[in-house]
Image: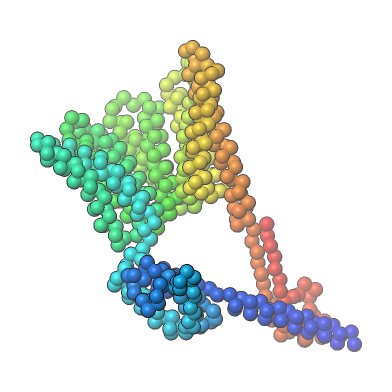
Amino acid sequence: MLLKLNLKKAIMKTICISCLFLIIALALRAQERQVSLDNQGKVTSITAEMDRELKLFQDYPDFKEASVFQTGDSVFSLEIVCLQGKQLVKTKKTLTYADLQALRDSVSIRISRNAPELTLNQEGRTLMLVTNSLLGFYYGGALSNILDFKDDKLTVTTYLLTAGASFYLPYALTKDKNVTYGDAILGIYGQTRGIAHGLLVSDLLGFKWDSSMPMAMTLIGSLSEGIAGYLIADKGGFSAGRSAAIGTYSDFGMGIGMLTYGLLGIEKEKGFDAFALVGAASGLVIGHNLSKTTNYTWGDAFMLNGAGILGGYIPVSLMTLFPDAKEKAYFLVAELGTVGGLYAGDVLAQKFDFTTKEGIFIDLSESAGGLVGSGIGVLLGSGKEAYKSIMICGGLGALTGFILTAGAYSKNARSTAAFTKNVSFHFNLNPVWLFNLAGRQQAGRIPANASLLSANIRF
């Protein structure tokens, strides 16, 4: 009797669980999932602006948008939104998988034929074009200086044509190309830093400053490094944060190379150029490798830059307390402090994902804190020793500004990061339990912990 009662309870429990699964399945089935409208999976909706090129929904007056949602295993719904009077009206059409594939083929063909740019990611194109336009004023002056026309009219003409072409040429070349923020940032880094690198190479090779070669080397360095930066980022699929972080490490690498030159006390003039260039290249490699394991955001790169500057400045300011310190001691603490600051910044970047706005605000807070601290230092200092209080208070103010702002933003990032990184959930279904239920129950061989469903959560 007891055995039959237990078996009845087990069967009822199984029925209830099965009903629960059926309800969940029906609920999930009722959810609609948006699917792509092209074969490449890049277009999820067609807007009125896009349809001016594709001409797919010209039969619908005042067409606004079209999307496709999956409503079943092989059933889809085409939803077309139009404007009638002052109201939006949605029309739905049921599609089979064959219908959807035919629509995708049509969309893909028309995109390829009429508007290939619709499937491109050009989010960073505006940033790139604006920067190129501004750099065009430098390129125009550099080219005019290199050509060294005796006729002023030719000189001015060359300058103006080059400055204008600095927008139109990249505009035309990138019309049908991907230009992500990562592409644009690393390309801009190469263009701007290439000018400095070109000057260092020119000096290292012994070109005289009164010749046109230094200017030519800056132009060559800017264009070649800009193109290389864009191509490398595009091929590697670099994010904005990764490109920005690589550039930041390269900048600090060049600075550390200069400090190393001063620390070693090398008297050869060309040694400065060599150390700076080697440092920049080393920073580039280090940044590239670190960015493989740390998912830098653009905000992280701003924060990292502030941390590196702060790390280099504070120990130098404290060195003013030791008036008898040698020059090399300043180089040493600046170099060690910069490395320490970058390390601290990298640790923060691994734990938190700062947004672009947050990263900028952290740097601004650091700068503002430094200014406030320097102002206090002016009040506290007097006479020839005033510079000490200005530098020390400025450093403490900058550190306070950095810590307060980064700490405030990291509180929100910490809860999200902790949950996503440290919490795991596992769900297990044991269907064999249903089939063997009766036999095992009768034999008394069902373990105490046997169950159809099991779940565990780990913190």
Pick whichever, 107 or 319, lies toward us: 107
Examine the rendered structure and indicate whether residue 417 appears above or below residue 403: below
Percent position (x, y) of residue 451?
74, 75
Furthest-right residue in view? Answer: 1
Q: For residue 108, what is the image quadrant? A: bottom left
**Which part of the image, by quadrant, shows the N terminus?**
bottom right
Percent position (x, y) of residue 2?
89, 84
Which residue corresponds to the image point at 28% horizontal and 30% vertical from the top-left? 270
**Which part of the image, by quadrant, shows the C terminus?**
bottom right
Which residue corresponds to the image point at 20% horizontal and 45% vertical from the top-left? 162
Percent position (x, y) of residue 393?
54, 24
Which residue corresponds to the image point at 43% horizontal and 80% vertical from the top-left? 100
* Count of numbered labels shown in the rendering: 0
Judge left or right: residue 8 versus residue 225.
right
Furthest-front residue in view? Answer: 85
Pick whichever, 183 or 379, lies toward us: 379
